[in-house]
Image (cartoon, coloured by chain):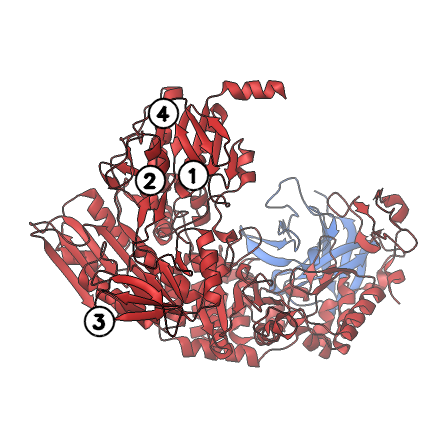
Chain colours: A red, B blue
């Protein structure tokens, strides 16, 4: 122990005060460069939570928890050898003795100190500002207070119509209270937007139900007559409300530095040089607390840049490497405020003598303005409202400082089908400073998916705004390399899935021979056999379009391993059987029936993640007998074998739960029964939660539904498994009929357009325009296909059949389940061997199977009790017995 | 030559596979119409499980293959070789149809 401490003591000490986004980024970069090995690093955060994503703060209300926002944890830091102290406020800094002191009088000395203390919300000195339920919007603790206050409030006012204020308004709206925004200036977002842009934003936000009051200065807050507060404005008007949120700007948190004698600016901010060094030796300041050339940078991207600059200076002191410099940062920004796309670039409010291009489209609700220099040849700034798709192009034009070769208006009239050509050094991801060249390099090295690029370059993993662009660069690079991106599913077809689907639909092709004959490659058409890629794909398309019995003569030999025998093939060649248990609701009688059937056929039983029961170990030839028994007991197929709807998981909902606000089980059953049997590009999972506590984990499903007190919130594109993704919030507070309408459209649109074996999560990310585009197609019917999509779903729903019932009803189909053409020749004493573990039958293992497992306090077999509190090693020898199939039969 | 009658030719499913017991072993039979009839050991050499008759038929590289339903290795119906793993191969049987019967030669086709 002593040794270790000595060793630690030998390392120089690096302390970081503040664990916000910038402080955390500093630590991430430090670890990436291995400097956590060279320094003894300790971090002090005054909040009780480790770093979280403050940019996405209002998501806290959508999810009801901070979990999805978390960026760091004490454990994750500890793994890198870094101590993270939470809830520790640093109250004193002594630059002479190089020590810091916490509020509970603990002290630490440092060799290097980084101040990343961020900022605090500015509350204007208005009389009555300290009344109860007058809150600020900055931390998760603040949000918790707002959330609690909103429960007792009918209405809320946000003071401040800037970027943060509108975020706060979004929060109040999400909490379901009447929402007002009060702004001192005559328009919203006066710092970034010009008057017309502010006006359009205002219209759009008012359409969402937010009341906007501009040119209003609050002079006092007093007790109200009809609500808790009355806000009195300087024009003698007033507004009554139960809850007030101040969001009138931020101020740099420089108190610690100020009291220690470190130089601060006149209007606040810790003065730093181009290495982010303060006036005290070895003390750095980064992020919103730092003042560089009299400027504060209140965005996350410049904060990250400062973090990297400070780190490179620290690294240079130990390794002699060259330190980079901070030379200011671009404050251009693109964001979504209350669902409205807003972007500002450079001098977004204009410059003197400027030429400009202004495009105001009242029909589509978009406004764009470009500010050019006097000559009209250089882009100086831009503002975009309602549609920010030109942002990356304009930003690069602005940052490059290059002459605009065409008339400037052409910058706003890019044909969206023509890919934009970026220069190699163009910054694609401004959060993480990733250039096009960085991305291209990784694509050439073999990272071909957006997920992989996110992982290795961090591009699109900050605010995520550049995701579509990164995808485009991946595709462009792959094409340039001569790699096929999505085209040609296999050697038999030069089409992708979407094209094949379209061909089958338009030409009404319903057999594989017709498809490969007409559209296969010349060689493929000659033999006409296809392969294990194109055949199951064709079968899936035929099923999506016509929904015929999947084992009908013309389709049976196209089906993949599981579909081919309507069961899930297991490693030993046996199948598992999964009857549908819609919504996870099952009567005791049916549960008993399942148990009896499983027992009779000696099937291993396991509860699945989708709230149903999987019965394993059925021989192919036994499937019909088992299904006959199941169908007699009122079960139907669960389609566990199909690329189709699996389950709609649900929590118990308002019928029993004290917290439930809607009948989640009822809806889950309705949805499962509606969409069962739909063949899709891949499996589809749903879940329905009865309240915001989200016990059904709906956000991890392809389609997730969460009850609100007004209806349902719909989430799309979630996924668990290998690549977890939270679903995107698609629509809020919708009725059951609208919900079904949207899901109908989404699922058929997915079925039509997704690639082979592409889950909804990846599909959604691959759609150009992503969620916004999907919403426009589904909600606004921008392609004019909504009715067609619904009709298609109606057809699928009305032609549903239980494939097992159809199979059992016709002897010619049933013949398929005879595994052997000459079953009478079965040798005496079949070779199938099983072992018994924990009271159930398993295949005898070769190398992978159940094997020896330690069990604790579990009955392993009738008469074989686990030892109480002890770990019993189940001897395979004792429990293994050989079984012939004959023994299994009753 | 030891030809064994397995079943009626009419009993074979068209364009698909089926398994048969041949002297205590399982054999996969594939009836591909014009392209002929093929027989191979039903055991997937990659896993040791008797499943190949349930695989999908593929034409690839100017040959005909069956894809194992377990992990999709492709085995040639004409030479038994595996595309993905040179070390794997399946034993082939001679098969023919005579007077409406399907016959298999119980002597394995050696290589």
Return the residue nearer the eye: A218 or A776: A218
According to the image, label 1 marks what residue? Answer: A18
From this view, report whether residue A160 is shown above or below residue A748: above
Residue A282's disc number? 4
Q: Which of the chains bears the disc numbered 2?
A: A
Disc nearer the start of the sequence (2/4): 4
| Residues at marks 4 and 3, CA–CA distance in whole angstroms | 55 Å
Disc nearer the start of the sequence (2/3): 2
Say whether residue A631 is visible.
yes
Q: Residue A198, position in %: x, y?
A: 23, 63
| Residues at marks 1 and 3, CA–CA distance in whole angstroms | 46 Å
- At horizontal 52% and vertical 56% (from top left) the residue drawn is A65
Same chain? Circles 4 and 1? yes
Q: Is residue A49 left or right of residue A242?
A: right
According to the image, label 2 marks what residue? Answer: A289
Observer-side mark, 4 or 3, equals 4
Disc nearer the start of the sequence (4/1): 1
User: Which quadrant, please, contains the N terminus of chain A?
Assistant: top right
Near mark 3 (Cα within 10 A), the count class, few <14, some 14-19 or many ≥20, is few
Look at the numbered disc 4 and give the secondary structure of its residue. Answer: loop
Q: Is residue A572 left or right of residue A870?
A: left
* Labels 1 & 3 near each other (Cβ < 8 A): no
In the figure, residue A263 lies in which quadrant? Answer: top left
Look at the numbered disc 3 and give the secondary structure of its residue. Answer: loop
Look at the numbered disc 1 and give the secondary structure of its residue. Answer: loop
User: Which quadrant, please, contains the C terminus of chain A?
Assistant: bottom right
| Residues at marks 2 and 3, CA–CA distance in whole angstroms | 41 Å
Same chain? Circles 2 and 1? yes
């Amino acid at each position: 122990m002593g040794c270790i401490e000595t060793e630690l003591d030998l390392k120089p000490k690096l302390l970081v005060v503040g664990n916000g986004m910038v402080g955390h980024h500093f630590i991430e970069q430090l670890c990436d460069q291995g400097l956590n090995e060279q320094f003894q690093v300790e971090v002090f955060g005054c909040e009780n939570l480790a770093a979280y994503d403050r940019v996405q703060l209002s998501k806290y209300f959508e999810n009801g928890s901070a979990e999805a926002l978390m960026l760091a944890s004490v454990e994750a830091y500890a793994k890198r050898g870094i101590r993270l102290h939470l809830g520790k406020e640093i109250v004193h800094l002594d630059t002479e003795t190089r020590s810091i002191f916490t509020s509970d009088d603990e002290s630490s000395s440092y060799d290097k100190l980084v101040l990343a203390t961020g900022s605090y919300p500015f509350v204007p000195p208005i009389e009555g500002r300290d009344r109860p339920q007058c809150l600020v919007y900055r931390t998760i603790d603040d949000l918790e207070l707002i959330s609690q206050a909103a429960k007792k409030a009918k209405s809320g006012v946000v003071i401040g119509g800037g970027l943060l204020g509108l975020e706060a308004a979004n929060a109040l709206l999400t909490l379901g209270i009447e929402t007002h925004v009060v702004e001192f200036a005559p328009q919203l977002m006066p710092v970034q937007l010009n008057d017309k842009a502010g006006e359009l934003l205002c219209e759009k936000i008012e359409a969402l139900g937010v009341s906007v009051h501009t040119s209003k200065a609050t002079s006092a807050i007093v007790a109200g007559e009809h609500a808790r507060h009355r806000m009195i404005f300087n024009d003698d008007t007033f507004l009554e409300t139960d809850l007030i949120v101040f969001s009138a700007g931020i101020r740099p948190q420089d108190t610690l530095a100020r009291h220690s004698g470190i130089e601060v600016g006149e209007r606040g901010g810790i003065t730093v040089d181009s290495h982010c060094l303060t006036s005290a030796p070895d003390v750095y300041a980064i992020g919103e607390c730092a003042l560089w050339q009299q400027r504060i940078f209140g965005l996350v991207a410049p904060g990250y840049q400062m973090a990297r600059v400070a780190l490179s200076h620290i690294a240079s002191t130990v390794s002699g490497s060259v330190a980079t410099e901070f030379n200011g940062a671009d404050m251009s920004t693109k964001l979504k405020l209350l669902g409205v796309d807003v972007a500002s670039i450079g001098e977004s409010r204009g410059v003197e003598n400027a030429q400009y291009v202004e495009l105001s489209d009242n029909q589509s609700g978009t406004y764009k303005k470009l500010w050019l220099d006097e000559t009209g040849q250089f882009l100086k700034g831009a503002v975009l409202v309602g549609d920010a798709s030109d942002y990356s192009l304009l930003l690069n034009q602005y940052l490059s400082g290059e002459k605009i070769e065409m008339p400037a208006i052409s910058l706003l009239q890019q044909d969206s089908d023509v890919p934009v050509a970026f220069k190699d050094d163009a910054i694609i991801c401004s959060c993480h400073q990733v250039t096009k060249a960085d991305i291209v390099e990784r694509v050439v090295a073999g990272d071909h998916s957006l997920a992989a690029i996110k992982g290795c370059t961090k591009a699109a993993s900050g605010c995520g705004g550049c995701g579509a662009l990164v995808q485009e660069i991946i595709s462009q690079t792959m094409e340039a390399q001569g790699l096929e991106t999505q085209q040609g599913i296999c050697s038999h077809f030069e089409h992708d899935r979407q094209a094949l689907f379209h061909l089958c639909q338009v030409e009404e092709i319903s057999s594989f021979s017709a498809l490969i004959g007409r559209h296969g490659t010349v060689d493929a058409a000659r033999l006409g056999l296809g392969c294990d890629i194109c055949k199951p794909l064709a079968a899936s398309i035929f099923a999506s379009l016509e929904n015929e019995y999947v084992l009908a003569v013309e389709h049976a030999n196209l089906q993949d391993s599981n579909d081919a025998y309507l069961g899930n093939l297991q490693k030993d060649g046996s199948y598992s059987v999964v009857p549908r248990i819609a919504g996870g609701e099952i009567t005791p009688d049916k549960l008993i029936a399942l148990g009896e059937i499983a027992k009779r056929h000696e099937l291993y039983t396991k509860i699945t993640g989708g709230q149903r029961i999987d019965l394993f170990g059925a021989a192919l030839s036994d499937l019909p007998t088992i299904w006959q028994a199941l169908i007699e007991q009122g079960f139907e197929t669960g389609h566990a074998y199909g690329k189709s709807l699996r389950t709609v998981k649900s929590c118990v909902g308002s019928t029993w739960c004290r917290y439930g606000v809607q009948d989640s089980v009822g809806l889950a059953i309705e949805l499962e029964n509606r969409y069962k049997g739909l063949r899709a590009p891949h499996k589809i999972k749903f879940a329905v939660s009865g309240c915001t506590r989200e016990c059904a984990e709906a956000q991890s499903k392809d389609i997730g539904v969460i009850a609100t007190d007004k209806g349902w919130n719909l989430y799309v594109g979630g996924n668990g498994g290998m690549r977890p993704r939270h679903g995107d919030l698609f629509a809020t507070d919708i009725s059951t009929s609208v919900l079904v309408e949207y899901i109908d459209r989404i699922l058929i649109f997915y079925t039509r357009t997704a690639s082979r074996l592409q889950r909804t999560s990846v599909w959604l990310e691959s759609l150009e325009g992503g969620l916004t585009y999907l919403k426009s197609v589904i909600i606004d019917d921008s392609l004019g296909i909504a009715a067609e999509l619904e009709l298609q779903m109606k057809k699928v729903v009305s032609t549903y059949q239980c494939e097992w019932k159809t199979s059992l009803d016709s002897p010619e189909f049933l013949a398929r389940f005879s595994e052997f053409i000459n079953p009478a020749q079965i040798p005496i004493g079949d070779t199938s061997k099983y072992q018994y573990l924990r009271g159930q039958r398993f295949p005898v293992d070769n190398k992978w199977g159940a094997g020896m497992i330690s069990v604790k306090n579990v009955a392993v077999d009738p008469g074989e009790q686990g030892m109480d509190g002890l770990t019993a090693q189940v001897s395979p020898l004792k429990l293994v017995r050989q079984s012939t199939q004959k023994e299994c039969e009753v | 030559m030891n030809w064994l009658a397995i079943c009626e030719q009419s009993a074979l499913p068209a364009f698909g596979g089926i398994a048969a017991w041949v002297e205590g072993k399982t054999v996969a039979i594939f009836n591909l119409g014009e392209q002929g009839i093929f027989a191979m050991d039903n055991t997937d050499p990659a896993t040791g499980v008797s499943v190949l008759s349930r695989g999908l038929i593929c034409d690839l590289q100017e040959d005909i293959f069956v894809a194992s339903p377990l992990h999709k290795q492709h085995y040639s119906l004409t030479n038994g070789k595996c595309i993905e793993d040179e070390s794997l191969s399946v034993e082939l049987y001679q098969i023919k149809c005579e007077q409406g019967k399907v016959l298999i030669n119980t002597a394995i086709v050696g290589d």
